[in-house]
Amino acid sequence: MLAGLAGGCLGVVVPKRWAKRAVTRNTIKRQVFSVSQDFEPDLPVAAYVVRLRSGFDRSRFPSATSEPLKAALRLELQQLFQDALARLTAAAVPRAT
């Protein structure tokens, strides 16, 4: 799924392997797009891909749209975007030699 950022784009990959139910995959995608809007003004124009690399424990999050799941997703995504922004900022600063 792709969404437009100001001049760039954001792709989200949520495999069935890690999120069996479509409602869970859609919830994850919505959270990614929501959090990305908070960081959009600071991100340079580029193409970005967010890929789910591991599953969520269904015993801990039994409902695909539960508030604890959304909160956990939001926290992890905010950390991901902050780390990415820090790396991009560090890479853009020229090194003095």
Image (tube, helix red, strand yellow):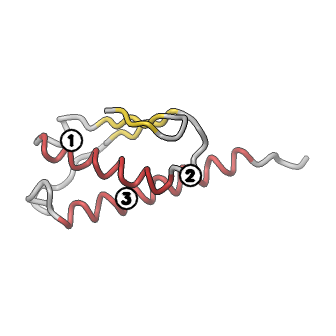
- Check whether the beta carbons of the residues at disc 1 and disc 3 lie within 8 A of each other: no
Work out whether mark 1 precedes mark 2 in sequence or the reverse, and give the earlier one.
Answer: 1
- Side of 75 relative to 80 (left or right): left
Question: What number is the disc on residue 18?
Answer: 1
Secondary element type, mark 3: helix
Residue type, numbered disc 3: Glu
Q: Residue at x 24, y 60 (%)?
A: 70
Q: Quadrant of residue 21?
A: top left
Residue under pointer 2: 41
Work out whether mark 3 precedes mark 2 in sequence or the reverse, and give the earlier one.
Answer: 2
Residue under pointer 3: 76
Q: Residue at x 56, y 34 (%)?
A: 46
Work out whether mark 1 precedes mark 3 in sequence or the reverse, and give the earlier one.
Answer: 1
Residue type, numbered disc 2: Pro
Instruction: Using a 10 Å C-alpha cutoff, classify the residue at mark 2 as few (fewer than 14 neighbours), some (14 to 19) or many (20 or more).
Output: few
- Check whether the beta carbons of the residues at disc 1 and disc 2 lie within 8 A of each other: no
Residue extending farthest front? 6
Q: Nearer the viewer, residue 86 or 59?
A: 86
